[in-house]
Image (spheres, rainbow, N blue to C red):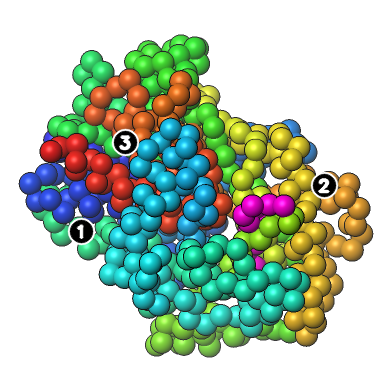
Amino acid sequence: MEFDYVIVGAGSAGCVLAARLSENASVSVCLLEAGPPDTHPLIHVPFGILWMMHSRRLNWRYYTAPQTHLHGRRLFWPRGKTLGGSSSSNAMCYTRGHPADYDAWRDLGNPGWGYADVLPYFKRAENRERGGDAYHGAGGPLNVASLRSPNPLALAFVEAAASAGYRRNDDFSGAEQEGVGLYEVTQIQGQRCSAARAYLRPATGRSNLRVITRAQATGVLFAGRRASEVAFLEGGTSRKVRARREVILCGGAINSPQLLLLSGVGPGVELQHLGIPVLRDLPGVGRNLQDHLDIILVQECKKPVSYGLTPVTAVRGLAEIVHYVVAKRGMYTTNAAEAGGFVKSGAREPWPDLQLHFTTAPLSNHGLDVKFLLQQGYSLHVCDLRPKSRGEIRLESRDPLAHPAIEPNYLDEPEDLEKLVAGFKAARRVLAAPAFDPYRGREIAPGPAVQSDDEIRDFIRCKAETIYHPVGTCRMGNDPQAVVDAELRVRGVEALRVVDASVMPLLVGGNTNAPTIMIAEKAADLIRSARI
């Protein structure tokens, strides 16, 4: 098989690139995806997010190394493994981060990546149902909608946060990020609008685009220093596909550095130790891992309006099936994290440094802790938006099917823990506000016994988890630790790019799906201009 472009990974970035590059009928594109097609109905029903956490077929189900500063716990890292990648299993919150995040990328030596540069690509991607304006697009592939049937608890959260002193904001991606409100979501007519639905589905009928699912890439092959082929496994059979123009890695912050390392591109000493021939000694591959660490407060709900797995909810759920099938409204349209916002931990902060996600169910450990769900309750998540700690992805084996070692190094910098302590206190104040009086029962987690700063710190070490935003492991820049340049070309080799969240030099202050789609939109232009 031979194509002009071979794209590895059909997640948020890969779907965008496959669709955009194949718009030109004179070029051919092959898209490889390790997971199956996105045909399972629970992918498309927003409330199916809880099931996606448990799926062993549509989820990579990664675990971190034991975390020194989290009492040695190995944290669960779910990542989507199907067409659409994690956009087929995320909470669908549409946020972009703060404009200053992108200006910081530019100032690190990445011309063309400031906020003014990337805003047109956010707008190109977007079809905002509220309409386009100076900050938003209309007519793009990615549908951005208001919640169809917000839970009364989400509305109570907005009232509670406002009474606690936080400003209201109905557009976190507009003129001002700071404030609290209901999230806009990547949904269309009450269904999930993943990158696969938004970009790939309209493109699949093109004769110049081939999508191969259940095809796990095992290495990039080079002719000299030029990327020329991708080896992959399909149904247990080893195969290869040749790229006439470029190979583009879109595997995300875990799989893209893993594939580079397996292909001999990375820290030379580590590759030699594993017996992998070194094609290009590139020390930054797998380094600079950043993620949003999240702590959750859980409150009992006195009214049967939450989405706990209780007999009342089960009965209601049966009736709601008809409502959803007929009108695509009701509880099955929930994205779970219906409300939240961006707030400051202190008055001296120049922009919001904490993010809140309010969920209308009692959650612990990604919903895997079922005993929490067997009750009426609601949860408030808080994360530090710009952690100082840095981790890494590294190989433990030459086996391409083995999971790499994931070392986020959470809370290695003491400041990160103190930010979460401040966020915990802010979240507790919101949950104590009068708007929750009709609903509030006992505090389930951590419980009233946890009061002092030391007790809060220990609760964080015992219970904090990822909120699913790993980035940075193939970061762009022009220094010795950078993996790609500002045009996303892997340094020191030819015809190879990385286009996904791994290229972010710094973690953005918000959810990462929309920024990843933006990166791919911009990359499509960079790739097309390279052919001129």
Measuring 79% from the left and 51% from the top, which residue is drawn there? 421
SS for tag 3? Answer: loop
- Are the residues at dot 3 and dot 1 in contact (C-beta closer than 8 Å)? no
* Residue 380 seen by the camera: yes
Q: Mark 3 or mark 1, which is nearer to you? A: 3
> Residue 406, relative to residue 98: is it above or below?
above
| Mark 1, residue position | 203
The three-letter code of the residue at mark 1 reads Ala
Q: Provide residue 379's location: percent of width, then percent of height.
A: 70, 67
| Mark 3, residue position | 487
* Residue 238 seen by the camera: no
Mark 2 and mark 3 lie on one chain; the one further toward the N terminus is 2
| Mark 2, residue position | 457
**Seen in the image, is 16 located left or right of residue 45?**
left
**How far apart are the two marked residues, 3 and 1, measured between alpha carbons?**
25 Å
SS for tag 2? Answer: helix
Q: Residues within 10 Å of mark 1 (few under 14, many from 20)?
A: many
Q: Provide residue 470's location: percent of width, then percent of height.
A: 53, 44
**How far apart are the two marked residues, 2 and 3, measured between alpha carbons?**
42 Å
The three-letter code of the residue at mark 2 reads Arg
Q: What stretch is highlighted in magenta?
A: 348-360
Q: Mark 2 or mark 3, which is nearer to you? A: 3
Q: Residues within 10 Å of mark 2 (few under 14, many from 20)?
A: some
Measuring 62% from the left and 54% from the top, which residue is drawn there? 351
Q: Which mark is residue 90?
A: none
Measuring 38% from the left and 56% from the top, which residue is drawn there? 119
